[in-house]
Image: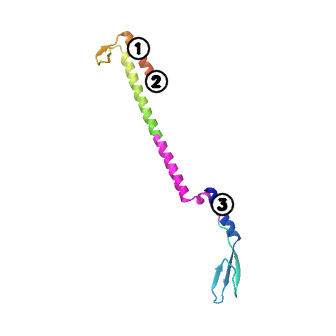
């Protein structure tokens, strides 16, 4: 599409540069300007050189559809960047909450107080020393995994 637009501008500039404009006064004393030479009797005839149009910049050569497409692309990219930033913030907040929960659990287990847990039936039981050490090891792994 850009090549086509550039070729069109170049071709029109070349045609305009080679074209001549004629100016003359006819029998009724009217000034006539044309791209064709006069026919018949002419009082004054002048040949004018046509000025070549200024080369179009790349921004001016873009069509409205191209600019609209670029605008929509920029909008989509900014929307995706914002969504990615929101997802990163949510993930960071979840990691922070997981870290705080793991540290709290580790602190509770290391405090020396009696710790009660619930089994699969929903009944409460208290941890003995070996179970406490296992839970402390699990809590330390959770802290290492969540608190980076």
Dot 1 corresponds to which residue? 134
Q: Secondary structure at mark 3?
A: helix
Horizontally, residue 3 falls left or right of residue 131, namely: right
Q: Residue furthest bottom?
A: 28
Seen as rendered, the residue at the extreme top is 129
Q: Which residue appears at 49% of the width and 42% of the height?
A: 81
Q: Position of residue 135 (x, y in %)?
A: 39, 16
**Left of 105 or right of it: where is 27?**
right
Going by the image, does 132 lie left or right of 23? left
The picture places residue 142, in percent across and down from the top left corner, at: 43, 22
On screen, 145 above or below 5? above
Residue identifier under label 3: 7
Q: Earlier in the sequence, mark 1 or mark 3?
A: 3
Q: Which residue is mark 2?
A: 145
Q: In front of the other: label 1 or label 3? A: 3
Picture coordinates of residue 101, whole percent (x, y):
38, 25
Q: Residue at x 46, y 42 (%)?
A: 82
Marks 2/3 in contact by CB < 8 Å: the verdict is no
Secondary-structure class at tag 1: helix
Which residue appears at 44% of the width and 33% of the height?
91
Say which quarter of the image contains residue 134: top left
Q: Which residues are magenta?
A: 54-83
Residue 125 pos. (x, y %):
30, 14
Which secondary structure is most common in the magenta stretch? Answer: helix
Q: In this rendering, is residue 106 above or below 34?
A: above
Q: Is mark 2 in CB contact (under 8 Å) with mark 1?
A: no
Give the Cα distance between marks 1 and 3.
Answer: 77 Å
């Amino acid at each position: 599409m850009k090549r086509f637009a550039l070729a069109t501008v170049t071709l029109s500039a070349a045609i305009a540069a080679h074209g001549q404009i004629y100016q003359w006064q006819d029998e009724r004393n009217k000034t006539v300007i044309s791209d064709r030479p006069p026919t018949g009797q002419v009082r004054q005839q002048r040949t004018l050189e046509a000025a070549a149009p200024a080369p179009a910049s790349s921004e001016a050569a873009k069509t409205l559809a191209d600019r609209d497409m670029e605008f929509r692309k920029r909008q989509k990219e900014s929307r995706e960047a914002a969504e990615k930033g929101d997802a990163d913030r949510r993930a960071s907040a979840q990691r922070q909450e997981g870290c705080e929960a793991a540290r709290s659990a580790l602190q509770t287990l290391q405090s020396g107080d009696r710790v009660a847990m619930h089994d699969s039936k929903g009944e409460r039981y208290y941890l003995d020393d070996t179970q406490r050490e296992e839970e402390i090891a699990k809590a330390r792994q959770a802290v290492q995994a969540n608190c980076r």
